[in-house]
Amino acid sequence: MNRKLFLALVVLGLGSFVFTSCAKYPQAEVDATNLTIQEAVTAGAEMYLHEEFVAMQDSMNAVMVSLEEEKSKFFKNFDSQIAQLTTVTTMATDLKAKTLVRIEELKVEIQTLITETQALVDTNKVLVQTAPKGKEGKSALEAIKGEIEVIEASLAEVNTMFASGELLATIDKAKAAKEKAAAINEELNTVIAKFQGKKK
């Protein structure tokens, strides 16, 4: 073989060897994925879709471990990790969108709870006026009036919390208020029905 040709092939081989062994760390892809994850965090994914957020973070952590392992090798090839980063980026993008939908769902649910609870409170106030007021009945009705006032105070807090964006805490408090109002409504209706039954 021609000596010059042989040397040229050796040089090309070495060049290919160096190129393969020094594959570039995919920092741009890592940064892009982290940016998308941060957008999901900003949207509230960690709070509103916690389990899915943790799964996404676990996936990213696994990719980072794999990247470090590949980085330590003499012959580096980051193709697999780049594909995994693309998958995590898609997960983060989807999670952000789902978080925004979940937030809107919570807002609607809270507003519905507030409306339904207020309606129960208004009905209970009317029922208190028509409930029997015997010796025992009078003290029981005073206690119920006190409970209705507590529910009204809770509703005021719910509205304040809702306005400040504390959706998860707000919905828990709203549900508790509605349950209490519904329990009082059932109690009053039962007492009134029994009283009317005796009158017949």
Image: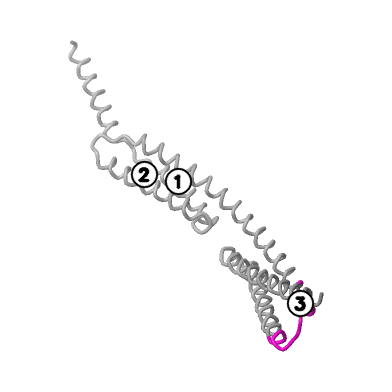
The answer to whether residue 37 is left or right of residue 161 is: left
Q: Disc 1 on helix, strand or loop?
A: helix
The answer to whether residue 93 is left or right of residue 61 is: right
Residue segment shown in magenta: 123-139
**Numbered tag placed on residue 33 in the rendering:** 1
Q: Which-is-in-front pick, marks 2 and 3? A: 3
Residue receiving disc 3: 195
Residue receiving disc 2: 63
Crowding around mark 1 (Cα neighbors within 10 Å: few <14, some 14 to 19, many 20+) is many
Contact, CB < 8 Å: mark 2 with mark 1? yes
How far across and how far down the image is residue 48, in percent? Answer: 53, 57
What's the residue at 56%, 63% (across, down)?
Answer: 168
Image quarter where the N terminus lies is top left
The disc, 2 or 1, on the residue closer to the chain's N-terminal end is 1
Front-lying residue, 82 or 22? 82
Front-lying residue, 126 or 137? 137
In the image, residue 51 lies in the stretch drawn in magenta: no
Front-lying residue, 47 or 137? 137
In the image, residue 134 lies in the stretch drawn in magenta: yes
